[in-house]
Amino acid sequence: MRSTGFRRTFVTLMASSVVLTAAACGAGDDDGKAADGKTRITVNCEPPKSAKVDRSFFEADTAAFEKANPNIDVVTHDAFPCQDPKTFDAKLAGGQMEDVFYTYFTDAKHVVDVGQAADITPYVKELKSYSTIQQQLRDIYTVDGKIYGVPRTGYSMGLIYNKALFAKAGLDPDKPPATWEELRADAKKIAALGKGTVGYADYSAQNQGGWHFTAELYSQGGAVVGDDGKKASVDTPEGRAVLQNLKDMRWKDESMGSKQLLVINDVQQMMGSGKLGMYLSAPDNIPILVKEKGGNYKDLGLAPMPGGKGTLIGGDGYMFNKKDSPAQIRAGLKWLDAMFLTPGDGFLGDYARAKKNDAPVGLPEPRLFTGAADAKDQEVKKANANVPVENYQAFLDGNQSLEMKIEPPQAQQIYSVLDGAVSAVLTKKDADIDQLLKDASGKIDSILTRG
């Protein structure tokens, strides 16, 4: 899953309408040659018109790319979310995907398995930035030794906490909990403030509970699926510890509040209103809490995942339609380089422009690049930072020692199963953890068997 959605300034969720017509997508039409002889590519994930600032950035950067590459015509399609799970597989099956299309990290192997991705291995050497991207991110789009896509952004999970509530509860606001035991103790003290204050909140519906279960399991050193990818690995001491901790905080400590079956918007609203002490999230939640939910940057701290063993990482990138001509693949790679993969420039890298337009710069996002490219990216970001970066230092320092683990295969189906286990311990005082894990394990095995 993507932690929040789009990026920087666009955080308004809206319904996505997709017109599934070959004419709209144009993948592979006439080898991508337009009437004027230009190579024509369709691309998606353009910010919708409601995201005025990001839309203007995207249009300006695309126009600049076309001016620098007069033989390439880029046709952009707007959408939010950039990938709608309800229509993604239908577009794939119908051969109606754009020439260059957005995917979550977890989609890469699936798109290849259903035969809808172009092998870009012979062309990727023409992508100037490719060798500068973190190897573990490049590997996500490499299947059986062949390259099918290019990563664009990444995120890792951590713990957002309210520094003001920490201080009010007699806790050190510069010392967030490093273990789940410490988190439980801190949550209890924060909840004791009363007046509707909740110490710790967690998701438990719409697959989001399963997503967070996975993150919490990783933090304890566990895994959702075994190394062979064929069997569940949730019915374990680590899985039991996750559910037991949630159950104890909910019913013994009463530090999670009485309202459950929460989703991301509910928890963000609680944190933004100053009534929540802690919740799991990625850094991109912070600007939402400030711009939409009434929070203040100075009150929001970010710590690494409690437990000290691992954290869930995710992200996105672009893949290429199997119908693309070599010219379209080359054009698409050039576009990706200019738009997203040039440190200090382009849609994601122009931090000076972002700052000028009051978009947050300096959030502790995982590093996409290595070497000189990384140094340049960090230098420009630091020079334009407009958020209290000191509030996130614990997250940056702590992440260095954590194992970075990607989401499991068949993630959304598995999350749906795990939702049931998480919601049960948060809504039923007598929930049987052993039976919940046994049932979840069997269902996940079935999902993995079906592939």
Image (cartoon, helix red, strand yellow):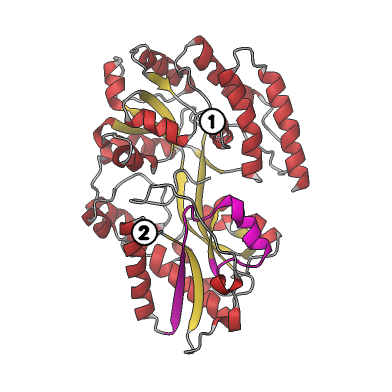
Q: Is residue 38 above or below residue 364?
A: below
Residue 66 lies in the magenta-colored region:
no
Q: Is residue 282 left or right of residue 312?
A: left
Magenta extent:
71-100
All told, the count of numbered labels is 2
Q: Which mark is residue 385?
A: none
Q: Earlier in the sequence, mark 2 or mark 1?
A: 1
Q: Please, what is the three-letter code of the amino acid marked with disc 2?
A: Leu
Mark 2 lies on a secondary structure that is: helix
Q: Nearer the viewer, residue 250 or 86?
A: 86
Disc 2 from disc 1: Cα separation: 29 Å
Give the x, y percent position of residue 415: 62, 37
Q: Residue 68, how many percent across, how many down? A: 35, 79
Magenta region includes residue 90: yes
Residue 432 against residue 423 in the figure, above or below: above
Question: Left or right of 16: which side holds 166?
Answer: left
Q: Which residue is mark 1?
A: 216
Asked whether 237 or 58 is in front, the reply is 58
Do we see residue 88 in this rendering? Answer: yes
Left or right of 88 in this view: 404: left
Q: Is residue 144 visible?
A: no
Q: Position of residue 104 (x, y in %)?
A: 54, 53
The three-letter amino acid code for the residue at tag 1 is Glu
Q: Which residue is mark 2?
A: 348
The picture quadrant where one finds residue 255 is top left
Q: In terms of image quadrants, where is residue 23?
A: bottom right
